[in-house]
Image (cartoon, rainbow, N blue to C red):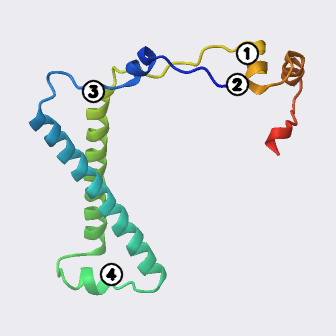
Amino acid sequence: MSLPEKSQVEWDELVVRRGSRSTRPKRWFEAAVTLTGWLWLSAVALQVLLSSILWVLGWNKFHVYVLELLPSATPLHVVRMGAAIAAMAAAVLVGWASYNRLRFGRLRRRKPPAPVSDAELAEMLGVPVGEIERWQREKVVNWPQDR
């Protein structure tokens, strides 16, 4: 007993094909932009994680490494710079999401599965049809294969 196999036509519908507009330089550029975005996002996440760990461990020299190095830096100035950096990061991520939506938004590859009859389900699971109908009426089903 095996599950029904997808035909080659159905699989081909799920594959994204590169159009004639997709030249090699364009693909390299898109790969470079994507790699740069992921590296930047990873670096920021790593910096936040390491800073948090060091802060928890007691190595919080914020006043020495930030406020004393920049004589004009005040805590309010640092908060404003943090907000500006967060806004820029949000702009980059929203721009990236918008680009992906424009590029891939028209693709509709998700298709709901075809309805399965009780007889097909019973055949796949190797149980009588009456058992499937009984399971559908029950609130909880104890199936021996789940244990």
Question: Quadrant where the N terminus lies?
Answer: top right
Q: Which residue position holds label 4?
A: 62
Question: Where residue 7 sits: x, y (%)?
Answer: 48, 16
**What is the distance, in whole Å, between disc 4 and disc 3 at their CAs?**
42 Å
**What is the distance, in whole Å, between disc 3 and disc 1 at their CAs?**
40 Å
Q: Residues within 10 Å of mark 3 (few under 14, many from 20)?
A: few
Numbered disc in front, either 1 or 4: 1
**What is the distance, in whole Å, between disc 1 and disc 4 at their CAs?**
66 Å
Whichever of callouts 4 and 3 sits on the residue coming sooner in the sequence is 4
Q: Residues within 10 Å of mark 2 (few under 14, many from 20)?
A: few
Question: Where residue 115 sits: x, y (%)?
Answer: 65, 13
Q: Quadrant of residue 67?
A: bottom left
Q: Which mark is residue 21?
A: none
Q: Which mark is residue 120?
A: 1
Q: Amino acid at mark 3?
A: Leu
Q: Which residue position holds label 3?
A: 102
Left or right side of 10 for 61? left
Q: Which mark is residue 1?
A: 2
Q: Amino acid at mark 4?
A: Phe
Q: Is residue 134 above or below residue 73?
A: above
